[in-house]
Image: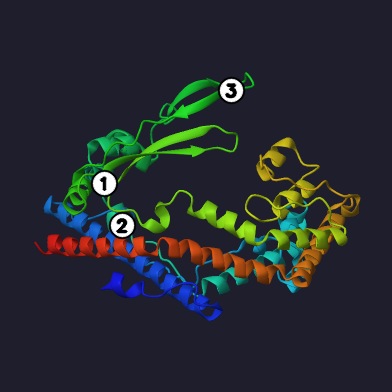
Amino acid sequence: MLGLTAGCGMLGLGEEAAESDEDRLVNMINDSNRLEAELAAAEYRLVEKCLEDAGFTVHDPWALQPYEPEEQESLTEYAPHEGFIIDAETAAEYGFGQWANSPDGMEDPATEDYWAAEEERWAEEEDGDTWEEPDTTDWDALDPADQYAWYIAYQGEEYVEWSYGSAQDYADMMTGEGDFSEEAPAEEEVVTDDGSLEIEEEMDPEPMPGGCQLEMIQELHGEPELVEETYENEDGSSETYEYWSYGVDNPLYASETMWEDIELAYADKMADEQTGFIDCISGKGHEGWEFDQYNALPVWEFFNTLYYQNASEEEQDMMIGDSSAVIPEIPEAAGSSYEEWKAYEIQTAVDFAACGEETGYADASDKAYEEVHVDAYAAVEQDVYAWQEEMNDALSKAQELLDA
C-alpha cells in the first residue's frame, strides 16, 4: 500500500526532522517517476499488441521507446547562486568561462583546456550514466510506404498527415527528393503596437490521435481530452495552444504556480543575504549588480555584452538577444582588449566567490532552497499519494489487457 505507508512523516518536528522530511519526499518523487515509466512502457506494449494484431511486426523504435527514470537524490538541483558563486579555485583559473565563448576566446589556446575540464566535470556529474540510441536497423530497412502505413495504424490517417503530410511527402522526405519550399505553415500579417508589420506562421491545430494509440487510450484511460493553455510573454502578449491529453496529471507538475511560488519564497528568505552580497561585491568595486527574477546575478548577459561590444549587430543579437536582465554598465576597470576583459572576468569570479564565503551566501542559499522545496512538495504530498494509487490501478488494468 504505497499511499498508506509513504506519507506517514510529519513536518515541523525540529531541525533533525528536516533531513527525514526531504528523504521521504525524494522517495515519493522517485516512486512517482518509476510508476510513470512503468505505465508508459505498458502503454507502448498495448500499442505494439494492437499493431501486431493488425499485421505490423516491425515498429519505429523511437516512437515506442521505453525509458528508465533517473534516480533523484535530493529535492533541489542547481540552486540560483551556483551560476555566480563558483568554486574559488575554478574561479581563479577560468573565471565564469564566458571568455571561452567570445570571438577572441575561440582563438585562445587556453580554450581547449577549459572545455576539456568542463567535459571532465560533466562526466563526473553524470556518474557513468549512459544512454544508447535504439537499434533502428529493421525499421530503416522498410520501404517508406510501409513506414507510412505503420504510422497510420499507430495514430490514424489525420494525425499522420498533420505530422508528415501525404504518403508522397513522407517518401520524398525519407529519400531526400522533392521540393519542400511550399510546405511551410500558412503565414498571417500582424500589425504590432508600434505600427510595424510582422509575419506570424500559423499551424493547423493538432488533431486527435487515432489508430492503435487511440484504442490504447480509450481502453486504459477513457476518451482523450483537448487541453487549451495560454502563456504570457515578457512583452505582455499571450499565446494559446491546444494539445490532446489523457490519463491523470501528476500533482507534482500540474500546478501552474508551484515553481513561481518556490522562487518567491526563496527570494523572501534570501532578501537580507542578497543585500549583504551586493554590499560585499560593491565593496570590491563591482557596482550596479541586481538580482534578477530568478534570484541570480546576470553574469552571462553582462560578460556577453562585454565580449561582444565590438561585434556585428547580427552577432550581438545572436549572443546577447533580447534579455530583459538589468546589467551593470561596463566599467573602465574592464579594459579595452580581450586580454583585459578576460582578466576582469576572472577577477570578478574570484571576488564573487570570496563574497560568497565572507557572507555565507552559498550556505544560506542551499538551506533556503531546500526549505522552500520541502514546503512546496509537502503541500501536494497527499495528492501525490492518491495519484500513485490511480497509477497502480492503471498498471493493473494494463496488465489485464495485455493478458487478455
Neighbour tally class for label 1: few under 14, some 14-19, many 20 plus, Cα within 10 Å: many
Q: Residue furthest bottom?
A: 16
Front one among 120 and 40: 40
Residue drawn 68% across the image and 39% down it: 317
Neighbour tally class for label 2: few under 14, some 14-19, many 20 plus, Cα within 10 Å: some
Q: Which mark is residue 309?
A: none
The amino acid on which the numbered mark 1 sits, given as a three-letter code, is Gln
The amino acid on which the numbered mark 2 sits, given as a three-letter code, is Pro
Front one among 236 and 10: 10
Evaluate whether residue 103 shows in this view: no
Badge 2 element:
loop
Single out the mark in the foreground, 2 or 3: 3
Q: Position of residue 185 (x, y in %)?
A: 42, 29
The amino acid on which the numbered mark 3 sits, given as a three-letter code, is Thr
Neighbour tally class for label 3: few under 14, some 14-19, many 20 plus, Cα within 10 Å: few
Quarter holding residue 269: bottom right
Front one among 68 and 378: 378
Query: Mark 2 = which residue?
Result: 61
Query: Mark 3 = which residue?
Result: 192
Q: Which mark is residue 147?
A: 1
Q: Is residue 63 left or right of residue 273?
A: left
Q: Quadrant of the C terminus?
A: bottom left
Q: Position of residue 178 (x, y in %)?
A: 38, 32
Query: Marks 2 and 1, how far apart in space?
Result: 12 Å
Q: How many marks?
A: 3
Residue drawn 13% across the image and 51% down it: 55
Earlier along the polypeptide chain: callout 2 or callout 1? 2
Q: Is residue 212 left or right of residue 313?
A: left
Q: Is residue 402 left or right of residue 193?
A: left
Earlier along the polypeptide chain: callout 2 or callout 3? 2
Q: Position of residue 155 (x, y in %)?
A: 24, 44
